[in-house]
Image: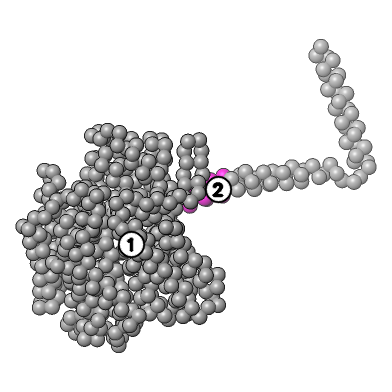
Amino acid sequence: MNLWLIPILPLIGFLINGVFGKRLAKPVIDAVAIGSVAASFAYTLWALWSLYPIDAAHHESYFTWFQSGTFQVGVDFFVDRLNAVMLLVVTGVGLLIHIYAIGYMAHEGGYYRFFCYLNLFMFFMLVLVLAQNFLLMFVGWEGVGLCSYLLVGFYFQEKFATDAGNKAFIVNRIGDFGFSLGMLLLVTVFGTLDFFKMSDAAKGHPIETQAGVLTLATLLLLLGATGKSAQVPLYVWLPDAMAGPTPVSALIHAATMVTAGVYMIARSSFLFAHTPITMRVVALIGLLTAVMAASIGITQNDIKKVFAYSTVSQLGYMFLGLGVGAYSASIFHVMTHAFFKALLFLGAGSVIHALSGEQDLRHMGGLRKKLPITCWTLLAASIAISGIPPFSGFFSKDAILAAAFHHGQYGPYLYLIGVLTACVTAFYVFRAFFMAFFGEYRGHAHPHESPLVMTLPLIILAVFSVAGGFISVPKWLAPMFPLAGGDDLNLEIISAVAGALGIAAAYFFYVLRPSAAETFKNKAGAVYTLVNNKYYVDEIYNIAIVKPLLYLSRVVLWHGVDEDGIDRNLVDGAGRRARDLGGALRYLQSGSIRNYATWVLTGCLLVILIIGLAGGVR
């Protein structure tokens, strides 16, 4: 089957453009970058069609990476029903975003470099998905983190971009450290990092009702997932990552990389199923993230920041699903989220492109006549994320909420908070939609619809945002994960009504009575200020962590230990003392024979005196 061809094709595109891109014309760069991803997508379709219906995983072992005693790690790929979904999402949505980027990046500098990074990202993400062991997955995991740093900081001449890239890189290193410790702990328990060998070994391991070694290992893996998938407390990097070009936001921070943590937990479900404590932590982190991010999204005026916080919130739903055991529902939401969230970001990019770089919603308005395709496609994505049937987001989000409702004695409370968050989500997404496309135009640019190379991907994603919910991912994954929750018409009606109420509220405040929104904001007072400042989480991190670390590194370690202790006292100090001693001794080397004779005579007299004194003592 040669599964290695799926990731290697984008890598070839990266190498060609990376080596020769500076001397190639843009159409050639486009052909290489997009052709490599298109070939990967086509080969993925062929491979999955050949293996259909994938009743058992298809394994391919290439070579032994390294071996120590009985512990062995191989470069092994495989395909089963779970990563088949991820492969189609990564290559399919990734291809559309690559096509869109041709139009969006047409007048940007570093054109070939941008597509190099995109192709390299595709390579690492596909390695992550295809890997048969934790360590090979970690290679892809770190690789997409590197590409995120490169793409978020793409405008490296701007300080805001480099700061955002550094923030994304550093925050993710915290999570990745947890991931690596979790892997080391799993090796001590199972003696392997292979998913299938570990799954077989875990069957004989008891359920840890009290915290044990597996609980600690899964909590460490969860720390890695919170970093990559932007969950509390490591979510702070993703909103700032909007500093990169908009196609980056769509590809990395909506459709693929940020879902890596969800995929990793689903892939490791055989471990998490043995650790109910960790499962509760996953659910609570997901719910807290969803609520926090949704509330912050209400106050944002940067169109990309609005959709960034909606990404964080939707990832929270996915973690909620994982925590209540609804793995198939979470992966279902990964797929539908890839459709409508990529569309939201690309639609936002189309608006920004039409307004010559303007991102502030307060400087938009009345764009539905100037940008009809962008307007209608963004409307489809906004309805989908709001959970209105029969759009795609309704089916996946409802599956998660239904599973939460039936999950133990606290299930109804999880469901209620989830539904209220869905209402808030619909409100702030449609707030952005109405502020951009309704009312009077409040900007200074000359809006125009984007070219076909940008609008065509919007149309295709809009089709999947509308109809993608009918792709029954939970049934497809049923042989791997039992269905959780089940169909409940009353719960479906409640969640749909909640989304509709959010849309209606946004229409009232931002179309019918725009002044009411300003009045409400003023009455909210301190609460609005708190939310608008994102609960001061970044400021708290800055005071509690960043400044102490900077003080420790700069004042204590750099100036104190390095400069004063090592340089001044040890290195420079030793040099100064040797110089001073040499300066004193040089007077003995005057070149005068009389002086030398005097010193020799003086020395002899001292020796005689010492010998005489020694004899007298005896």
Task: Determine whether, in the image, residue 578 is placed left or right of residue 109.
Answer: right
| Residue 61 x/y as whole percent | 45, 49
Q: Which amino acid type is shown beneath numbered disc 1?
A: Trp
**Which label belongs to residue 562?**
2
**Which label belongs to residue 243?**
none
Up-down: is 222 above or below 488? above
Mark 1, secondary structure of its residue: helix
Residues in magenta? 551-565
Observer-side mark, 1 or 2, equals 1
| Residue 235 x/y as whole percent | 31, 56
Q: Residue at x 13, y 58 (%)?
A: 419
Q: Nearer the viewer, residue 167 or 593?
A: 167
Up-down: is 285 above or below 209? below
Q: Residues within 10 Å of mark 1 (few under 14, many from 20)?
A: few
Residue for badge 1: 49
Q: Quadrant of the N terminus?
A: bottom left
Up-down: is 138 above or below 150? above
